[in-house]
Image (cartoon, rainbow, N blue to C red):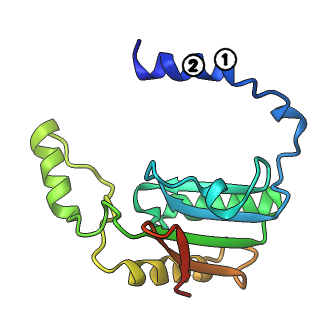
């Protein structure tokens, strides 16, 4: 059985029901932007329950145009007011060269992607830059409660950067 079929089977056995009875707006009015790294469970990390927050994930937890789109919808349509940007030590995006990655994909597929992988060198600087991009976005209603953190994977603790 492949992983998708196993995931479907685990879902059948999980007994998760009643999600449709929960209100769509997050109870804590919080949006979290973080990395897709499989080691990071944002709900567990922050002591959240289903329905508490929006968790927006991508490679590196980088604040891209698509993240801004998601946060804008989260704020304007679902009432979130605060945003946490959480990136982490040991991230695979640290040191990833966008140009090399694009060239690699072009060599393998014959097509150079229009998008950037958004690799970075300095973790703390990337957190600062992400927070600043959110704060400067005219599409967000609440730009005063945006904070950035580094998750230290070794300890599991957040360190505030901005």
Q: Residue at x 46, y 81 (%)?
A: 129
Q: Residue at x 75, y 74 (%)?
A: 141
In-front residue for pair 137/134: 134
Element type at mark 1: helix
Query: For the residue carrying disc 1, how many other residues have a C-alpha within 10 Å: few (<14), some (14-19), or many (20+)?
Result: few
Q: Quadrant of residue 140?
A: bottom right
Left or right: residue 64 compared with residue 12: left
In percent of width and height, residue 28 lies at 82, 63
Write down the residue under mark 1. 12
Query: For the residue carrying disc 2, how many other residues have a C-alpha within 10 Å: few (<14), some (14-19), or many (20+)?
Result: few
Are the two marked residues, 2 and 1, in contact with CB atoms closer than 8 angstroms? yes
Q: Is residue 7 above or below residue 137?
A: above
In percent of width and height, residue 10 lies at 59, 22
Q: Residue at x 81, y 27 (%)?
A: 17
**Distance between mark 2 and mark 1 Cα atoms:** 6 Å
Write down the residue under mark 2. 8
User: Which residue lies most toward the left here?
Assistant: 107
Q: Residue at x 75, y 77 (%)?
A: 142
In percent of width and height, residue 5 lies at 49, 16
């Amino acid at each position: 059985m492949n992983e998708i079929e196993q995931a479907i089977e685990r879902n059948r056995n999980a007994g998760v029901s009643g999600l449709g009875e929960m209100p769509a707006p997050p109870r804590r009015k919080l949006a979290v932007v973080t990395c897709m790294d499989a080691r990071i469970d944002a709900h567990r990390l922050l002591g959240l329950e289903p329905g508490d927050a929006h968790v927006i994930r991508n490679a590196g937890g980088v604040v891209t145009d698509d993240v801004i789109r998601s946060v804008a919808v989260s704020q304007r349509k679902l009432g979130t007011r605060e945003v946490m940007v959480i990136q982490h030590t040991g991230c695979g995006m640290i040191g990833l060269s966008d140009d090399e990655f694009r060239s690699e994909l072009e060599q393998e597929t014959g097509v150079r992607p229009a998008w950037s992988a958004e690799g970075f060198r300095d973790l703390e600087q990337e957190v600062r830059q992400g927070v600043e991009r959110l704060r400067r976005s005219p599409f967000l209603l609440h730009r005063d409660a945006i904070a950035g953190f580094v998750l230290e994977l070794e300890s599991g603790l957040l360190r505030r950067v901005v």
